[in-house]
Amino acid sequence: MSDASAEPAATRRRKPPPIRTDWVSKTLAGLLLGFSLSIIASGLLMTRLGDMPLPVSGQLAMWLVPPVWLGVLSLVYFFGSGLRAWAWLLGANAVALGVWWLLQQGSAA
């Protein structure tokens, strides 16, 4: 009979890591900040589609929101913590909003 303590450390089964409890904060970050990021992405697309008729460009911009939002919501769980998810998504929102603002300033001149 072999004793478990006699096995080398490399062959012992490791205890699986516990379930992370910050999935709620990650989900909220994906829902709230992912939605705002998708709306900003839609606005960015609208600034580039100025020569297209409004019914067509409006539909394209409208249908851009769900894939971007759901993409962010599904990728948010790869962040190490909920705080990192909030920080990175806030930064992405700020950058996207800044780009949108710059494009709006350029098109107004």
Image (cartoon, rainbow, N blue to C red):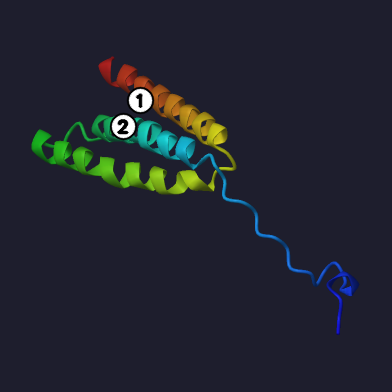
Gap between marks 2 and 1 measured at Cα: 6 Å
Position of residue 60 measured from the top left corner of the image (x, y, whole percent): 19, 42
Count of all numbered marks drawn on residues in the image: 2
- For residue 30, what is the image quadrant? top left
Give the residue drawn at x 11%, y 33%.
Answer: 54
Position of residue 88 measured from the top left corner of the image (x, y, whole percent): 52, 33
- For residue 84, what is the image quadrant? top right
Q: Local crowd at mark 2 within 10 Å, few (<14), some, or many (≥20)?
A: some
Q: Which element is circle 1 on?
A: helix
Q: Is 73 on the left-hand or right-hand side of 4? A: left
Quadrant location of the N terminus in the rendered image: bottom right
In-front residue for pair 17/45: 17
> The disc labelled 1 sits on which kind of residue?
Trp
Residue 23's place in the image compared with 50, above or below, is below
Outermost residue, right side: 6
Residue 13's place in the image compared with 100, above or below, is below
Give the residue drawn at x 45%, y 24%.
Answer: 94
- For residue 40, what is the image quadrant? top left
Q: Are marks 2 and 1 in contact (CB under 8 Å)?
A: yes
Quadrant location of the C terminus in the rendered image: top left
Give the residue drawn at x 55%, y 32%.
Answer: 83
The residue where tag 1 is placed is: 100
Q: Is 59 on the left-hand or right-hand side of 10? A: left
In-front residue for pair 17/61: 17
Tell me which label, 2 or 1, sits earlier in the chain: 2
Outermost residue, bottom side: 1
In-front residue for pair 49/9: 9
The residue where tag 2 is placed is: 44
> The disc labelled 2 sits on which kind of residue?
Leu
